[in-house]
Amino acid sequence: MNKKTRDLVAVPKAIGALCLVILMVTVFVDVVGRGIFNKPLPWGVEVLEIVLAVMICTLYPVLALEYGHITVDLIKFPSGVQRFQRLLTAVMGFALFSIICYGTALHARRTMDSGEATAMLHVRIAWIYVLMAILMAVTAVTFIVAGRRILGGAKVLTSVERELEAL
């Protein structure tokens, strides 16, 4: 992966890391408040749901671009077969995330019309769905980029080689 791509991927990784920290702190404060003071965070669950959705949707494009999906290399295939597998993954990922984007956008529109909001924080749910739909579209486009990289001759690494390269 070139420097420009690495720099671009650093932004969603940082957002994902920040979301993870928010999740950990919220859970810690909620557990301590519940266990010691018998006062849990009344809005803790809503924050966890929103932050988790943002974290997941923000990190999907990174997984697509870095081929970071969970893989198990049980059988050693030739490079051409591995390239075909990656290309098939990119095509399927584009198709599936396009469908997810479309469904999420439809749901965002419905919740926008109804004016639904969270119970405690009164965050408009439609805006969360809009953000998720945008990030799903970015993920679909990222799968196209990943597929083009494979067609352009990008080296196909096994999961072990990817781990060693990351070190």
Image (cartoon, helix red, strand yellow):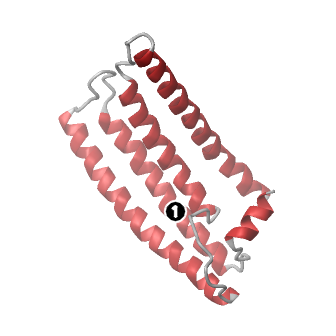
For the residue pair 145 and 75, the one nearer the viewer reads as: 75
From this view, report whether residue 156 is shown above or below residue 47.
below
> Residue at coordinates 59% horizontally, 34% vertically from top-left?
18
Q: Is residue 1 visible?
A: no
In the rendered image, residue 9, in percent from the top left (x then y), is placed at: 66, 51
Residue 31 figure quarter: top left
For the residue pair 57 and 147, the one nearer the viewer reads as: 57
Residue 45 figure quarter: top left
In the rendered image, residue 151, in percent from the top left (x then y), is placed at: 64, 80
Left or right of 111, for residue 29: right
In the rendered image, residue 53, in percent from the top left (x then y), is placed at: 43, 42
Q: Crowding near pointer 1: few (<14 within 10 Å), some, many (20+)?
A: many
For the residue pair 33 and 123, the one nearer the viewer reads as: 33
Q: Is residue 165 visible?
A: yes
From this view, report whether residue 152 is shown above or below residue 117.
below
Furthest residue in direction left, as rendered: 114
In the rendered image, residue 165, in percent from the top left (x then y), is placed at: 79, 63
